[in-house]
Amino acid sequence: MKGVTQVVEERDVLAALRGVLDPELGVNVVDLGLIYGVEVRDDTVVVTMTVTAPGCPLQDVLPRWVREAAERLPGVRQARVELAFDPPWTPERMSAAARAELGL
Amino acid sequence: MDGHGLATSLAPRLDLPLRHLLAGAAFYLVAQVALLGQAENLARAGYLAWPLAGAAHLLTLGWATMVMMGATLQLVPVLLRVRLRSEPLARLAWWTFTIGTALLAGSLFAGRPRWLGPAGALLVSGVLLYAANVGSTLARAPRGQLQRWALAAATGFLVLTALLGATLALGLTGTPAGGVAFPRLLGAHLAAGLLGWMSVTVFAAGYRLIPMFALSHGYAQHRQGPAVALLVAGALALVLYSLGAPTAVPGALAAAAAYLLFGLDVADIVRNRRRRVLEPVTRFTLAGLAFALASLGLAALAFLVTGRPAAVRLAFSAAYAFLGGWISLMVMGHLLKIVPFLTWLERYADQAGDRKVPLVRDLFSPWLGEAALLLTAAGAALVAAGVLPGLPAVVRAGLLLTLAGAVALGAALLQVRAGWRQPPRP
């Protein structure tokens, strides 16, 4: 609506990121435990994330997809993704749904 | 994003690795067709037969080396976070290497040594261009990762293998090869190629890719460096032994120890995997490792037995188990993982997030991958076994199974490239 600023919350961002699938595993980045943090500063979103292993072939494309998914949210002007390897990702970070999907 | 769908900001355009991987699969199919008529030569361990040498080079150069080059060009930038020195140079190297391989294999198969000169010149040029490109890329990569020095050593062995091969070719065309006897040069060529180039590359790539695909965590990593170092030292010692140095025993022991450590590492990776079901790369690796161990045992027996005919048969069987079993299964497993992945990136990377987009595993039928594994393993086992007593019928049956495995691999890759998809998920 014109003149009304839409407020984006962390849960909105996480819901959007559930649409970003790891094409190899078939599980979204949130349930995989790749998202370390989401920070909303007015109309800017900063996502801190990791990949399953340093040197993963998706290391550059997954952050781009995450950024694009966040920027598609109404009220978000800009999204930034920071890649972190500390702490390293472990399978224990996966949600129960992801574990079930992967047969763990 | 451009139409070729860049995999990552550092990786080369996808057509570069893909052309290596697909050309490798095509060479593999041609090699299996060519080998089908060589059952008699294989059964009598006739390693000096021209057509057999042609088919062997289709396997070593066209298949294994081509795929390893393509995988290295994709993996080095992604794993080591460094841009490839020159993509145009890599494309030029591919053309030179591909034409050189086809010419060399063709001239050997047809028994026309006169073509060996131009074929060898093209082939060595292709290898040198590739090595210069990868070598200068590795030199700029951050230090500290095992893959950096392991792949540098492997590339050095590739150059050595090509130069020894060129020297052998000079001998076949009537040019003196520096006074070194043909069998000695051949031994050095094989040790440098099979152990120095192929095995070191497989170790370096496998140590990163096998745990990544199996989702392994907490596995032991302290043996990886020693395993690769032992393999490099063993390969070098066996090359020197072939050329006349008294380094056979330390070389063989170092190479055997390296394989033992690699086997222990793979077992640990498998034990610590989070995926309950063994995924394809792990299954191909485990089947391949059985061939590697059998090959080591046969090679040790060849070293210990008295009597040249028995030693030649054992060594020949060991070489087939190594190349047709271990190396081919490892290459195949990774090919069936990397080609669908790169194809997915090429076609769907821009549509990520769309639920209608297939997953990587939806791009081909898993049954074809399983068929390729079973047929190749059964075929390689039959050929290696048939060589020992010299039974052409057993060797021929093995070659037929291996050809069927190559057809299954080709069909799987065709499915991927032709846009076939598994039925949509609910």
Image (spheres, coloured by chain):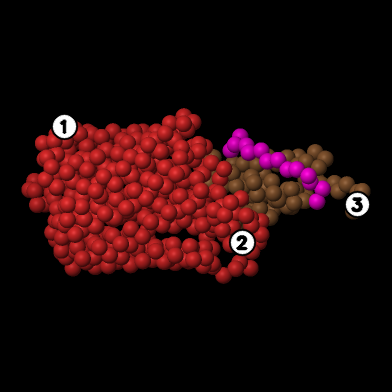
Say what amino acid the circle numbered 2 marks: Val
Q: Is residue B57 left or right of residue B241?
A: right
User: Which chain letter matches label 2?
Assistant: B
Q: Is residue B98 left or right of residue A98?
A: left
Task: Give the position of the C terminus of chain B as an image quadrant.
Answer: bottom right
Name the residue at 41% across, 38% down: B134
The colour applied to the residues of chain B in this rendering is red
Q: Which mark is residue B357?
A: 2
Seen from the viewer's position, the closer of residues A31 and B149 is B149
Marks 3 and 1 share the same chain = no
Q: Residues within 10 Å of mark 1 (few under 14, many from 20)?
A: few
Q: Label 3: which residue?
A: A2
**Which picture quadrant has residue B63?**
bottom left
Q: Please report the bounds of the magenta region as a residue range.
A: A74-88
Q: Is residue B42 left or right of residue B65?
A: left
The colour applied to the residues of chain A in this rendering is brown
Q: Which mark is residue B245?
A: 1
Q: Residue pushed farthest right?
A: A3
Residue B121 position, x and y percent, is 26, 45
